[in-house]
Amino acid sequence: MAHPTRRLVVTAVTAVLLVALGLVAPPDRSGLVGPESATAASLPQPGQRGTSVRALQQRLVQAGYLRAQYRTGYYGSRTKKAVKALQRASKLKATGRMTRATDRALTTAVAAMKGPRTWYHSETIGRSQSGRAISAYRAGEPGRPVVVVMATMHGEEDFGQYVAYGLLEGRPVRGVDLWVVPVVNPDGLAHDRRWVDGHVDLNRNFPYAWVKRANSGPRAVSERETRVIMDFLRRTQPRYLVSWHQPLNGVDTDKVKDLALSKRLAANLQLPLKELDCGGVCHGTMTAWYNHTFAGAAVTVEYGSAARSTRRMKTRDADAVLAAVGGRRG
Ligand SMILES: [Zn+2]
């Protein structure tokens, strides 16, 4: 009679041998056995929450399977539905669970959404408080009017980055010397929050009309990101600076320098014109500092709280901005 413990050991040893010989796949933590389960345990799964879920959701948004407002960090029914749609489109079993094959299909789907790059130069213009790179890309034609498009200054406002990436893909950009900074606040984006590290609102930290408030920093230009952006704008001195936010759904008309620019953006993007007055008077904003200090015109564009489709933001909306600042696709 075999001792029960010894029988268990023999069974376990046999299983390990079979796995080692590649004859059977090891079970994952959920008890499912299959060719995908060897590494599936490390992939995010329904019911989980956290940064790996958020990273998965960002890829699903990039691939066009999830609307950007659902980058929540929670693997709920919306994410499951998006994963199922991806699996069906990739001829995989539609379970809504992440498998290694689904992960590979997602990588393919993200790549498929990307057009050829328009930019010819990229650089790290500085680093965030936590050391993340802040990247700028240059596209278009040197010698033409300089235009800067920025997004994700508030880390949870991540829709605008898709317009920014759309400008960096597709047919070549003509008529403008275009700089794009898709993510001004990478720490905020990583943590899905408005602030830069240290609980300061970057868009209250610029030195024009700065006032001391709980969110404006200990002094004007106290934040590393503020200095990075100021140095970059001093260097490039754009004719037009377009700064993307959400969710106020409109193009700013409050003390803007070039109302015609606001009108063109609003018409092209199908957004209303609005006085975005920060609920009273704006203090320490980037656009006010830029408009006060330089010859060029800065303006804020706000998407609404619901994201447009990734494809629309990357194509139609990117082209809409380009046309509003005097550029085109060539
Ligand atoms: Zn904002």
Image (tube, helix red, strand yellow):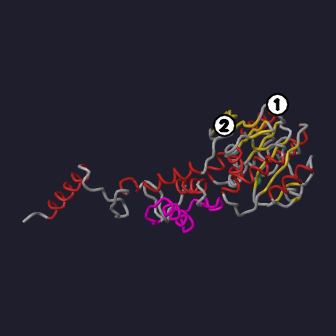
User: What residue appears at the point 81 percent right and 41 percent down from the top-left corner?
Assistant: 220
User: What residue appears at the point 57 percent right and 53 percent down from the top-left corner?
Assistant: 59
Report the residue that reaches farthest toward the bottom. Answer: 77
What's under tag 1, amino acid-wise? Gly
What's under tag 2, amino acid-wise? Arg
Label for residue 143? 1
Q: Is residue 205 left or right of residue 313?
A: right
Disc on the earlier residue, 2 or 1: 2
Residue 217 location in percent, x, y? Answer: 77, 45
In the picture of the structure, the residue carrying the numbered disc 2 is: 127
Judging from the image, what secondary structure is the residue with disc 2 in? strand
Whether residue 142 appears in magenta in the rendering, the answer is no
Give the Cα separation between the discs numbered 2 and 1. Answer: 28 Å
> Where is the C terminus found, in terms of image quarters?
top right
Residue 45 location in percent, x, y? Answer: 47, 61
- Give the image quarter of residue 308: bottom right
Please report the bounds of the magenta region as a residue range: 66-95
Q: Is residue 10 left or right of residue 115?
A: left
Q: Nearer the viewer, residue 145 or 299?
A: 145
Q: Nearer the viewer, residue 2 or 123?
A: 123
User: What residue appears at the point 48 percent right and 54 percent down from the top-left corner?
Assistant: 105
Q: Is residue 21 above or below residue 294?
A: below
- Give the image quarter of residue 138: top right
